């Protein structure tokens, strides 16, 4: 018999009309018509209506403002009304929005659960990082105190050495000055005797009589001989007064170019790989005394810095 639409001859199957080839496009239109009829048949009493105007607007089609959304287009992934299906989506895969919403609700619930788990893990790691920050601050505060303590000790030692050197210089100065002052006084006494002899002899020669000269000449000569016996240079030499040569030789500590005067910092970077930690880089100088700060967290890739202070 001929097809009423295209006039093509066809044979009715043995199982009747149910066995004939289906027109999916027309079936979809019939399905949409059924949904529209069911939607228009719904009646909600005024006393039970709870939706606000805003909520109602959210359920209305953006393209057709007077039509409510009842269909979801899986091809375009948009919620549409029946009129949209007929005009723009009639060849698309469209499903009842209630069924799709249930499937999407399950997907959202699943995603929500996964994101909650991810948040918990992230928060756990954040707390670990926060603890690590506090630990490194505390550890470096200890290192700072060690540096200040050792620097103060070094300053005190330098100050003490300075005072000792200055005291030694002062002692040498006082001893030498005392020796020189003693010799100076002896020379001044000798000079006083010479000056006295000179004045007396000159007075005798200028104003003395013959009798004065004969009476005083012998004793005056003896006095001159006594004064001349005093060997000035020999006396100074006999007092053990060799030249004093005091020099200062500075410490070579400042000449060192292999480190800081106070000490050194040793910094080790640790990489946490699997269940074992290994040192991959090291900067600074000195001996690593002990590791007092660590960063190991559940096989994650965490970089940690170990800083210690060492003395020379």
Image (spheres, helix red, strand yellow):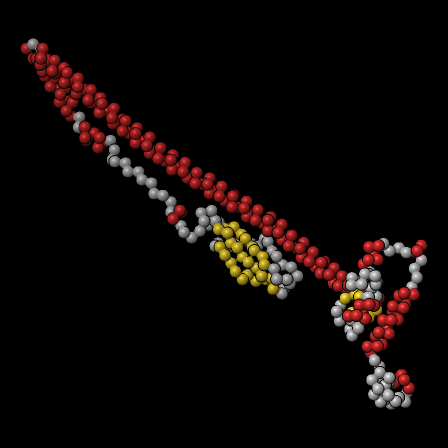
In terms of image quadrants, where is residue 24? bottom right
Res. 93 in view: no
Q: Nearer the viewer, residue 196 or 49?
A: 49
Q: Is residue 214 visible?
A: yes
Q: Nearer the viewer, residue 310 or 52?
A: 52
Name the quarter where the N terminus is drawn: bottom right
Q: Is residue 28 above or below residue 164?
A: below
Determine the residue positioned at 84% across, 74% down. 29
Residue 41 position in % (x across, y down): 92, 65
In this rendering, the count of numbered labels is 0
Residue at 80% of width from left, 68% of height from top? 84
- In x, y percent, where is residue 19? 88, 85
In the picture provided, is 269 more to the left or to the right than 83?
left
The single residue placed furthest to the left in the displayed view is: 210
Is residue 198 found left or right of 82 in the rendered image? left
Q: Is residue 154 left or right of residue 96?
A: left
Q: Residue at x 52, y 43 (%)?
A: 149
| Residue 90 vs residue 312, the one in the foreground | 90
Is 106 displayed left or right of 242 in the figure? right
Q: Find residue 22 and report its horizontal and vertical position in percent.
A: 84, 81
In the depicted structure, whether residue 21 falls above or below residue 62: below
Question: Residue 90, position in %: x, y?
Answer: 79, 73
Q: Is residue 80 above or below residue 209?
A: below
Write the residue at 74% across / 59% down: 116
């Amino acid at each position: 018999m001929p097809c009423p639409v295209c006039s093509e001859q066809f044979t009715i199957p043995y199982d009747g009309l149910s066995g004939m080839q289906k027109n999916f496009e027309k079936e979809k239109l019939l399905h949409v018509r059924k949904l529209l009829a069911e939607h228009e048949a719904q009646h909600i009493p005024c006393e039970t209506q709870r939706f606000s105007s805003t909520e109602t607007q959210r359920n209305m089609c953006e393209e057709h403002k007077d039509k409510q959304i009842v269909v979801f287009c899986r091809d375009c992934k948009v919620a549409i009304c029946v009129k949209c299906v007929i005009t723009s989506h009639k060849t698309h895969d469209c499903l009842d929005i209630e069924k799709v919403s249930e499937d999407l609700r399950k997907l959202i619930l699943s995603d929500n659960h996964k994101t909650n788990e991810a948040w918990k893990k992230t928060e756990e790691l954040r707390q670990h990082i926060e603890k690590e920050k506090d630990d490194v601050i505390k550890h470096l505060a200890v290192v700072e105190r060690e540096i200040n303590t050792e620097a103060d000790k070094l300053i005190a030692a330098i100050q003490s050495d300075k005072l000792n050197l200055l005291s030694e210089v002062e002692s040498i100065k006082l001893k030498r000055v005392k020796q020189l002052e003693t010799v100076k006084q002896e020379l001044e006494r000798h000079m006083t005797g010479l000056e006295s002899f000179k004045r007396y002899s000159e007075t005798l020669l200028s104003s003395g009589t013959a009798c004065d000269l004969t009476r005083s000449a012998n004793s005056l000569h003896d006095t001159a001989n006594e004064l001349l016996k005093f060997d000035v240079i020999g006396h100074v030499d006999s007092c053990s007064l060799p030249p004093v040569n005091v020099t200062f030789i500075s410490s070579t500590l400042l000449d060192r170019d292999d480190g800081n005067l106070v000490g050194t910092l040793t910094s080790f970077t640790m990489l946490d790989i699997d269940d074992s930690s290994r040192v991959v880089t090291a900067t600074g100088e000195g001996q690593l005394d002990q590791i007092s700060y660590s960063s190991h967290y559940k096989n994650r890739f965490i970089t940690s810095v170990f800083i210690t202070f060492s003395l020379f």
